[in-house]
Image (cartoon, rainbow, N blue to C red):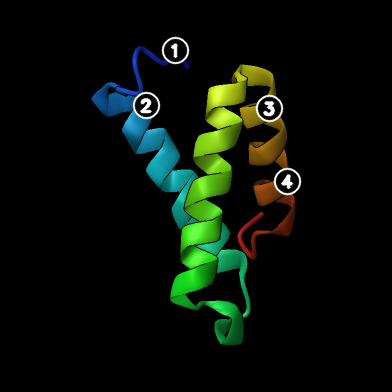
Amino acid sequence: MEQCSGVFDPEELSVLGSLYDSAVTALPTSMRSPENHAAIAKLILERTADGQAQLACLTNLLISISPQG
């Protein structure tokens, strides 16, 4: 994913949104607090800014812990 001045195209936003949804779903219900939601979003955006390799690692982790994985 390319980042240009912090702006993502719709396809990239869709991928990031799916990652976010998967991460939140993987949490036990008791951990789905607003603070944890924000921490997950921040982690995804930080890894995206760090580059494709970091995002791929995060994606693999989320797939591994996801109930659907």
User: Nearer the N terminus, badge 4 or badge 1?
Assistant: 1
Residue beneath label 2, please?
Answer: 12
> Could you tell me if the residues under marks 2 and 4 are in contact, i.e. CB atoms within 8 Å?
no
Residue at point 60% right, 19% down? 51
**Farthest-out residue, front:** 5
Disc 1 crowd, CA 10 A, few/some/many (<14, 14-19, 20+):
few
Q: Is residue 9 above or below residue 34?
A: above
Q: Secondary structure at mark 3?
A: helix
User: Nearer the N terminus, badge 2 or badge 3?
Assistant: 2
Q: Amino acid at mark 4?
A: Leu
Image depth: mark 2 or mark 3 in front = 3
Q: Secondary structure at mark 4?
A: helix
Measured from the top left, where is residue 37 in percent x and y? 48, 64
Residue beneath label 4, please?
Answer: 61
Give the Cα separation between the discs numbered 1 and 3: 13 Å
Residue beneath label 3, please?
Answer: 54
Give the Cα separation between the discs numbered 2 and 4: 19 Å
Please tell me the numbered disc located at residue 2. Answer: 1
Measured from the top left, where is residue 35 in percent x and y? 50, 71
Please tell me the numbered disc located at residue 18. Answer: none
Give the Cα separation between the discs numbered 4 and 3: 11 Å
Residue at point 62% right, 23% down? 50
User: Nearer the N terminus, badge 2 or badge 1?
Assistant: 1
Image depth: mark 4 or mark 1 in front = 1
